């Protein structure tokens, strides 16, 4: 099942429970706007190459659309559409004044020079400029994009408008209107969700056995914060495989190793492990922070974790959700677990619009408060309705948008 089909299947299940009208179901099932653009750029060799880019705005009922930009060889319209829909439910769930969007370029940035990536970014921004802006659609970093990418996008947009527009993107460097805490936002949010989940199963953080799939920005930060709290990180992985030590891995040393060697391989005192085997290790907490579709009906029965906190988007299929719920696994769904990024992006946007910037302690306190409150609401609805936590989270998000659409009415 494709990622989009999986997301739409979950959507239909939730809408059935909400008993929404057929018209509302259809309206939220499709994006408001899908943009496909051609991106011709000159490569360092002097030859021209044409890339394909996308920007999908799923919904704008609650405010301007918001979502990241990813650069990856597998980027396509269906994937971006699914991610945009998830962003709508995420923003509505955590009660931000945003709709959901997503974008990307089908490319392999790992084989491109910095100058080629800059030319690609600036041309892509120019091609989608008709649909984005601080009050229309706000861009952010995602897979294989970063602060520098956002700086180029903001600069390109500003040059076209004739004045500096800080709020068109978030995830920028501090000197260009970025927010304190933004770089660690998503990983910090995952960490907060592990802390709240541990309370539910009456476990202390110290000594908690944790497995992290995906050691990028989200996975490595969550692992470091949990390691500093005394958790035992017994396994981590990236796209090429993982490492395992039942006594625990020194995450600070591993981060330094990855910084120097660009890989987790060859780290001392560990055993190699596949990503498939890593998911089924005996542990307290599993953090899938890699890519979608990792926990399926084929391996869900073998999951031994008591808590799953989804750092990635869509790592668990609907069929696996049912299996995990029946096994009494406490699953914190992606639209809650990895919402730290969009929450602090919202803080950055607000600061940019006001030209007034907050201290990091204020940012972290407000992030923690929003995520804890949302965690409590999801858990309460899950228990009241006797439904899994993902369904509860989606019900809260979708019902908020559908209620706002009903109040706004139809124009014309």
Image: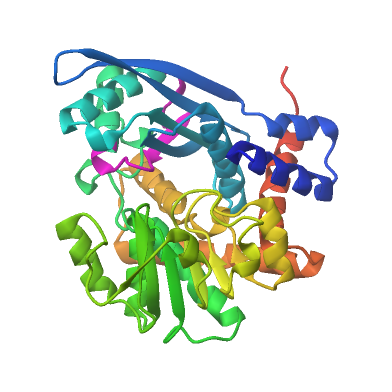
Where's residue 187, x and y in %? 39, 61
Where residue 300 appears, x then y in whole percent? 63, 63
Residue 52 appears in which quarter of the rendering? Answer: top left
Decide which of 241, 153 is in the foreground and name it: 241
- Relative to 388, say whether 64 is above or below: above
Q: Where is residue 265 shown, x and y percent of the image? A: 26, 62
Q: Let me know if residue 141 is in the magenta part.
A: yes
Q: Nearer the viewer, residue 110 or 119?
A: 110
Q: Which quarter of the image is occupied by the N terminus?
A: top right
- Looking at the rendering, the stretch of residues picked out in magenta corresponds to 129-149
Residue at image coords 72%, 35%: 405
Q: Residue at x 39, y 37 (%)?
A: 70
Left or right: where does residue 338 sit relative to residue 155?
A: right
User: Which quadrant of the rendered structure holds the C terminus?
Assistant: top right
Task: Report if residue 362 is visible in the image.
Answer: no
Q: Left or right: 213 with respect to 144?
A: right
| Rendered position, 135 above or below 337 | above
Tell me the residue at 39%/71% (across/down).
Answer: 235
Q: Is residue 210 visible?
A: yes
| Residue at 56% in and 31% down | 78
Q: Is residue 395 left or right of residue 277?
A: right
> Is the image coloured rainbow, by chain, by secondary structure, or in one colour?
rainbow
Q: Give residue 352's position: percent from left, percent from top.
A: 34, 42
- Nearest the viewer among 386 and 320 is 320
Q: Is residue 66 magenta?
A: no
């Amino acid at each position: 099942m494709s990622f989009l089909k999986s997301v739409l299947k979950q959507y239909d299940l939730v809408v059935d429970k909400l008993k929404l009208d057929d018209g509302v179901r259809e309206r939220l099932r499709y994006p408001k706007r899908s943009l496909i653009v051609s991106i011709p750029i000159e490569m360092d060799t002097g030859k021209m190459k044409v890339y394909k880019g996308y920007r999908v705005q799923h919904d704008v009922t609650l405010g301007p659309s918001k979502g990241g930009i990813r650069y990856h060889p597998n980027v396509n319209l269906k994937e971006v559409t699914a991610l945009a829909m998830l962003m709508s439910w995420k923003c509505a769930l955590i009660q931000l004044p945003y709709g959901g969007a997503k974008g990307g370029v089908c490319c392999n940035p790992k084989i491109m020079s910095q100058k080629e990536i800059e030319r690609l970014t600036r041309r892509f921004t120019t091609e989608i400029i008709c649909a984005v802006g601080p009050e229309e659609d706000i861009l952010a970093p995602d897979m294989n994009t970063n602060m520098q990418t956002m700086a180029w996008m903001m600069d390109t947009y500003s040059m076209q408008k004739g004045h500096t527009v800080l709020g068109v993107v978030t995830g920028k460097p501090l000197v260009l209107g970025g927010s304190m805490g933004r770089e660690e936002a998503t990983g910090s949010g995952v960490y907060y969700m592990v802390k709240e989940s541990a309370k539910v199963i009456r476990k202390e953080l110290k000594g908690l056995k944790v497995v992290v799939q995906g050691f990028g920005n989200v996975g490595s930060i969550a692992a470091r914060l949990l390691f500093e709290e005394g958790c035992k990180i017994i396994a981590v992985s990236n796209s090429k495989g993982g490492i395992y030590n039942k006594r625990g891995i020194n995450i600070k040393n591993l981060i330094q190793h990855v910084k120097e060697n660009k890989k987790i391989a060859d780290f001392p005192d560990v055993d190699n492990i596949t990503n498939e085997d890593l998911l089924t290790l005996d542990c307290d907490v599993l953090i899938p922070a890699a890519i979608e579709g990792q926990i399926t009906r084929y391996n869900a029965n073998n999951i031994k974790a008591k808590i799953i906190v989804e750092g990635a988007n869509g790592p668990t299929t609907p069929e696996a959700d049912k299996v995990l719920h029946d096994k009494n696994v406490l699953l914190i769904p992606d639209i809650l677990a990895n919402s730290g990024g969009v929450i602090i992006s919202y803080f950055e946007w607000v600061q940019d619009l006001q030209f007034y910037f907050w201290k990091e302690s204020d940012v972290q306190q407000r992030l923690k408060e929003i995520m804890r409150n949302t965690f409590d609401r999801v858990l309460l609805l899950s228990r009241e309705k006797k439904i899994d936590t993902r369904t509860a989270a989606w019900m809260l998000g979708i019902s908020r948008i559908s209620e706002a659409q009903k109040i706004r009415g139809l124009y014309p």
